[in-house]
Amino acid sequence: MMMNKYLTLSLGLLMLAGSVHAAGDVARGKAKSVTCAACHGADGNSAVATFPKLAGQNVDYLVHSLTAYKKGTRKNAMMSPMAAPLSASEIEDLAAYFASQSALTQKK
């Protein structure tokens, strides 16, 4: 029983370490993001509720999502073809750019 706890903890730490991505290049990501702007806004703050805001999102989340669209494990009629031609470094660059943007907040 105790062995299972250690094994689970060890596997969890390995997965966490594996989720850390090399930092993408914000400038290259900004240049590449022109194809994203029509739906997600130039800085990732979409004005349309049906398109998610990307600005300020976590880098790992963005990399994971784009990679899943690229591989087909996450399906969306618009996003899957957009992500398909992206290289791993382009995905990291886009993620770095959008994560570096300030997310808009609602005024109370």
Image: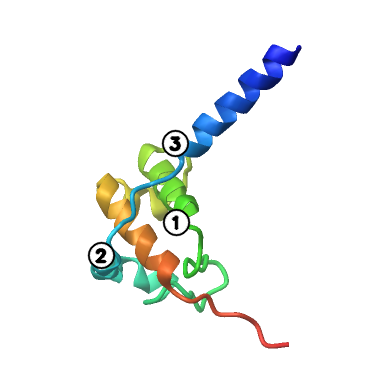
How far apart, in angstroms, are the residues tagged by discs 2 and 1?
A: 16 Å
Residue toward you, 97 or 36:
97
Residue of label 3 = 18
Q: Is the C-beta separation of discs 2 and 3 under 8 Å?
A: no
Q: Is residue 81 left or right of residue 9?
A: left
Residue toward you, 88 or 42:
88
Residue at figure coordinates x 65%, y 20% from the top left: 6
Residue of label 1 = 59
Could you say where residue 21 lies in the image, as x and y percent from the top left? Answer: 38, 46
Q: Is residue 108 left or right of residue 50?
A: right
The residue furthest bottom is: 107
Q: Point out the frontmost of discs 2 and 3.
A: 3
Label at residue 93 = none
108 up-or-down from 43: above or below: below
Q: Is residue 30 visible?
A: yes
Q: Is the C-beta separation of discs 2 and 1 under 8 Å?
A: no
> Disc 2 residue type?
Lys
Label 3 element class: helix
Could you say where residue 43 lies in the image, as x and y percent from the top left? Answer: 40, 76
Q: Point out the frontmost of discs 2 and 1.
A: 1
Residue toward you, 22 or 69:
22
Res 41 quadrant in image: bottom left
Residue at figure coordinates x 41%, y 38% from the top left: 72
Residue of label 2 = 32
